[in-house]
Amino acid sequence: MFEMVLYGKVAFRGRILTGSIGVEKGRIARIALGELKGEETLRLPRGQVLLPGLVDVHVHLRDFEQANKETIESGTKAALHGGITVVFDMPNTKPPVMDARTFRMRELLFRGKSYADYAIGFLVSRNCGEAKSVNADFYKVFMGASTGGIFSEDFEGDYSCAPGVVSVHAEDAEIIGKNPQRPPEAEIRAIEKALNAAEKLRKPLNICHVSTAGGIRAVLEKALPWVSFEVTPHHLFLTKEDFEKNPLLKVYPPLRGERDRRALWENLSRIPIIASDHAPHTLEDKGAGAAGIPGLETEVALLLDAVNRGLMSLHDIVEKMHSNPIRIFNIMNKGFDVGRDADFTVVDLRREWVVKPEEFYTKAKWSPWEGRKLRGKVVKTFIRGELLMEEDDIFGKPAGRRVEVAAKG
Ligand code: DOR
Ligand code: ZN
Ligand code: ZN
């Protein structure tokens, strides 16, 4: 007899089975075909499928001095609403998380405020001493200036000194200095530099938001096993023609042409991670030229809609937003296995809904997909066996925890 049993359609190892998850003390105690006995049993209604808890490795939660754009509370509620159980917090905050004291403040800020589980990032730019003194869950390097303005002038040095997985924003500082349009070459050049460093250093590197055909080709051709990369939903679903019609779609790296967008889809099976790069700004700041697109509450639904259109499978979503992120970032307490946290994202592929950003939890009250009808919706989110979101409502207190990252060799 399990404390709790979830019964219904389950996406498990590439197949959709009818089965049960037995939950004990917030962890997966058993995964079985057929129905297990529980003190409490939750049967998923027809049409709903249970996925393992989805992870977003690229989220800007702001807070600190930019709490008007987003807070830990609003951003992690948005995460649960969008079916995200773990968020990776980006350190380009104000002040930036790039010294031990600010890192400690960030840790304290998350405690008791986060609705989702989280990983805390640390910004590296000529601060190796500080980078080594903190125990961050991952490290971030900006190769060219972005929101916050801090970037690395010695990528190789900063990457080599970070004591963990490094995520890099790869846009070449020199090229974007000369050309503020940030052409594809800015990304391709930076990715080539990053790959050369990775080839030499043989340390885990994750390239954020790859958006160009040339960029993805460069990464795939080098095929370094310790290099991974992310693609965003906005680069998968939007192009620069959309941006020309809607200036709110300004983002770094920018939306690209149709040829680049298609190259991402053609390489879908080789994309390790899909992450939102949720970058909320107030509409006022957007009007003044801030770059960034909010994505937490639309990303999974957009992918479900793509599943319905035959562009990808549910298994692709699980691989790119659960299995691969957990493996690449060495998260020990997550994964769809006995003993791991009982985190689940329940989706309804048939449900149609219209994107209404005014009903979202993020403070960014706009979305590129406003007014769009999507087929496929996240209907429930569980963390450690607790139902925290159901049908747009969020329950309970903020009980998010920091993920457990394996000690770095
Ligand atoms: O468009 C962007 N917005 N690109 C980034 O790299 C940073 C992000 C932000 O923090 O606003
Ligand atoms: Zn970035
Ligand atoms: Zn970002």
Image (tube, grey):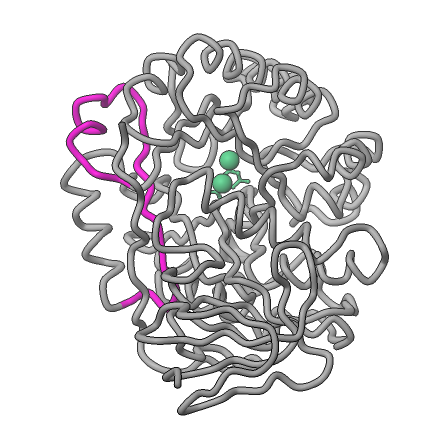
Residue 163, position as x, y percentages in the image: 27, 27
Residue at the extreme bottom = 39
Residue situated in front as seen by the camera: 244 or 323? 323
Say if 98 sits above or below 37 in the image: above
Residue 236, position as x, y percentages in the image: 73, 44
Residue 318, position as x, y percentages in the image: 61, 54
Report the side of 288 relative to 341 (left or right): right
Report the side of 376 relative to 163 (left or right): right
Residue 186, position as x, y percentages in the image: 61, 18
Report the side of 313 relative to 10 (left or right): right
- Image quarter where the N terminus lies is bottom left
Q: How many marks?
A: 0
Q: Magenta segment: does it hold 127?
A: yes
Residue situated in front as seen by the camera: 244 or 303? 303
- Image quarter where the C terminus lies is top left
Range shown magenta: 113-136
Q: Magenta segment: does it hold 316?
A: no
The residue lying at 74 percent from left, 43 percent from top is: 243
The residue lying at 40 percent from left, 27 percent from top is: 141
Say if 401 sits above or below 246 in the image: below
Residue situated in front as seen by the camera: 408 or 146? 408
Q: Is residue 287 visible?
A: no
Residue situated in front as seen by the camera: 364 or 141? 141
- In which quadrant of the rendered view does residue 224 lie? top right
The residue lying at 71 percent from left, 27 percent from top is: 212
Say if 15 sits above or below 404 in the image: below
